[in-house]
Amino acid sequence: MIPSVLPTYSRAPLQFVKGEGSWLIEADGRRFLDLGAGIAVNALGHAHPALVQALTDQAQKVWHVSNLYEIPQQKALADKLVEATFADTVFFTNSGTESCELAVKMARKYWYEKGQPEKTTIITFSGSFHGRSSAGIAAAGSEKMTKGFGPLLPGFKHLPWGDHAALDEAIDDTVGAILIEPVQGEGGIRPLPDQCLKGLRDLCDEKDLLLILDEVQCGVGRTGRLFAHEWAGIEPDIMMVAKGIGGGFPLGAVLASEDAASGMIAGTHGSTYGGNPLACAVGCAVMDIVSDADFLQSVNARAGFLRQKLEGLVATHPDVFDGVRGSGLMLGLKCKVAPADVVKAGFECGVITVPAADNVVRILPPLNISEDEMSEAVNRLDFAADAVREAMG
Ligand SMILES: *Cc1c(COP(=O)(O)O)cnc(C)c1O
């Protein structure tokens, strides 16, 4: 008999009943160090007092009104994002997938309004992940995600990640945009080198294309800058955001320059829930903390500390791990064993990590994790690696 919850996930047998900062507490009382943060969502850990305060204060006033009316919390959050980024304007969604939908629509509408309606094709790259909607899976294009779900939304050209020649060759008169993650998340924590992101920006300027960045996983302080593309010193035209921006409350956004957004006039897009008062009150609290320069500096300090610890872990277990990669607190342990085995052994040792493609275990702690917690988490991964080796015999 089919379970009452549609079985699209193979879930670990863990029920977390409480969260405290970087810790999750299981129903049986075990305490886990959380190096997954709900897949880069709990940017400030669990039950952060400022977020709890923002949520409960707003919950007592009004939760939802509809985008038919002015929403001051939404305007406040948009102002903060515009102030802190390249963007001139913001649309709020409830997820990364919805942000992908709007990014695709916005790019196509842009060229339509500019009198070049043929420029509908969007170039994407292997190993990417842009969500699970029809546009999201068509954009990523992997067999794993698309098989059986055809006909797929047309208008995406998939290129091998890092293949410059293929990129030059792919750009024809139908191409209107390039869509890429500055650091691939699901694909296995693969950072795009800064000079490649710069090169993509130059290419877009030269060939008259929009550059769309998917910062759903790598944004909101994760890499030690508010958004990952800042490391390359470039600006996108359109950017997808979600995950960390709500700190655990479902919230996403599409940020855009005034020009890139120019096709999206009244009536061209909407959302019932997107940008509701509750979500935006929490989003404001997250932004107030995460966009602060001192906070971002502290993320970089933590990242340096954790990376060094993980390099030590790899050196201790060369038969289990192949190396550390990533950017800031978006790190990956490349494995010589099945990543799922490492994650599972981690559970036994009280540490939570997240598997990804390309044989990688993702390390995505809360951005405010302490040094003691990082040390303890790596100790637990050390025990987990021993257990994996013993199981191999
Ligand atoms: C998670 C993710 C998405 C999809 O976000 P949802 O909130 O699950 O819809 C899109 N792009 C990237 C890079 C992601 O990591």
Image (cartoon, helix red, strand yellow):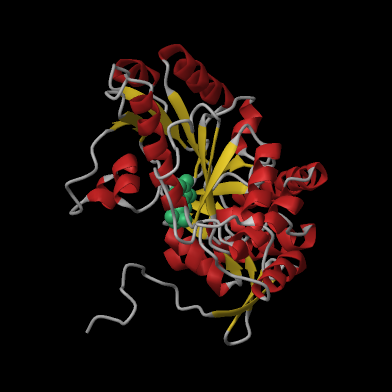
Q: In which quadrant of the rendered image does the C terminus lie?
A: bottom left
Question: Between 150 and 23, which is closer to the camera in this rendering?
Answer: 150
> In the displayed image of the protein, which residue is found farthest to the bottom?
28
Please say if 99 is above or below 168. Answer: below
Q: In which quadrant of the rendered image does the N terminus lie?
A: bottom left
Q: In the image, what residue occupies the spot 69% across and 55% down?
A: 284
Q: How many marks?
A: 0
- 75 vs 270, left or right, is right
Q: In the image, what residue occupies the spot 51% across and 16% down?
A: 202
Position in image of residue 250 (x %, y %): 53, 62
> In the displayed image of the protein, which residue is found farthest to the top?
206
- 234 vs 341, left or right, is right
Question: Between 239 and 375, which is closer to the camera in this rendering?
Answer: 239
Please say if 79 is above or below 316. Answer: above
Position in image of residue 169 (x %, y %): 30, 16
Q: In the image, what residue occupies the spot 29% across and 51% down?
A: 145
Question: Between 350 and 192, which is closer to the camera in this rendering?
Answer: 192
Question: Between 237 and 340, which is closer to the camera in this rendering?
Answer: 237
Q: Look at the image and tell me whether residue 356 can be seen.
A: no
Quadrant of the rendered image containing residue 154: top left
Position in image of residue 300 (x %, y %): 74, 43
- 245 vs 147, left or right, is right
Position in image of residue 96 (x %, y %): 47, 51
Please say if 377 is above or below 309. Answer: below
Q: Look at the image and tell me whether residue 155 can be seen.
A: yes
> In the displayed image of the protein, which residue is found farthest to the right?
294
